[in-house]
Image (cartoon, grey):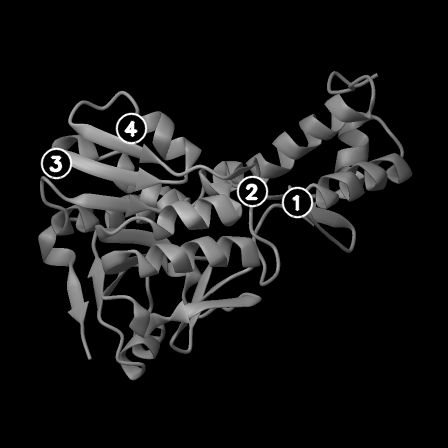
Amino acid sequence: MSGDQQRGPAPRQAAIAERVLAAGSASAAELAERFDVSLMTIHRDLDELERQGIVRKFRGGVTAQPSGVFESNVVYRLKTMRAQKAAVAEHALKLIEPGMAVMLDDSTSTLEIARRLGSITPLTVVTNFLEAMTLLSTERGIHLMALGGDYDPLHSSFLGVSCMEAVQLLQVDICFTSTSAASGGFAYHQEQHIVSVKRAMLDSAAKNVLLLDHSKLGRVALHRLAPLSRFDLVLVDDGASVEMLRDLDEHKVPYEVCGSGGPGDDRTGTA
């Protein structure tokens, strides 16, 4: 019996999810061999993990990577494009001043901002992202306002009508948000309930900034979140190609390219 053999479907499914989230994808045959079960059993496990929204099945295997209709689990997103998200977050800090009220959505891009806010205090920080709440809860000089609602474990955030109503009662100086895809002058996301909360956040801020790692440019997803013109500024890392940036230029989107090697790497595009 394999050392990875688990008793019962639930522990095995948890182990399968952990492996796929770490690797990004896996074949059904590989998983069947690793967990010493039949292909039929593995497909039942993968069906259940797909039902839970943790992975996405394709012919012969499974993936944790996003598609136009599937948003990756937060565990997977926390591991991807870390350097690019960090470069964008460092640039975003220039837009924040002590005394501001700052709103952060439930994206792993804004989490990189949260990691750095201790150097700019005092601040009021509003967020629905449990990861950011945990990080900021012990930070001195940060007045943390946690947005409640229905807890969504796949996103590690609070969503739903209660969250939207809480957002609508606030007015912040600046809101940082991210999304799954941007193309043709629009920002997109795969899930309607996420879109609804993000739109409420945009309406509650004096200034809106969109954070994008370059993998999100030139892609679309199921739901249009907002036109890119809805954002005062788009920040993207320097992995963005000339073609990707040309699309932003053609739609007159104000953007800044955030380099990882210092201020000299930063570039700006405006309408």
Q: Is residue 96 visible?
A: yes
List x then y, in percent, for residue 185: 38, 76
Residue occupied by mark 2:
73
List x then y, in percent, for residue 1: 84, 16
Residue occupied by mark 3:
120
Mark 1 to mark 4 CA distance (whole Å)? 28 Å
Query: Residue at the location (76% across, 35% down)?
Result: 31
Q: Earlier in the sequence, mark 1 or mark 3?
A: 1
Q: Nearer the viewer, residue 26 or 73?
A: 73
- Residue 114 appears in which quarter of the rendering? top left
Mark 4: which secondary structure? helix
Q: Nearer the viewer, residue 121 or 22?
A: 121
Mark 1: which secondary structure? loop
Residue occupied by mark 4:
136
Q: Nearer the viewer, residue 236 or 140?
A: 140
Mark 2 to mark 4 CA distance (whole Å)? 22 Å
Q: Residue flagged by tag 4: what amino acid is it?
A: Leu
Mark 1 to mark 3 CA distance (whole Å)? 37 Å
Mark 4 to mark 3 CA distance (whole Å)? 13 Å
Mark 2: which secondary structure? loop
Q: Height in image: 48 above or below 15? A: below
What crowding class fits label 1: few (fewer than 14 Cα within 10 Å), some (14-19), or many (20 or more)? some
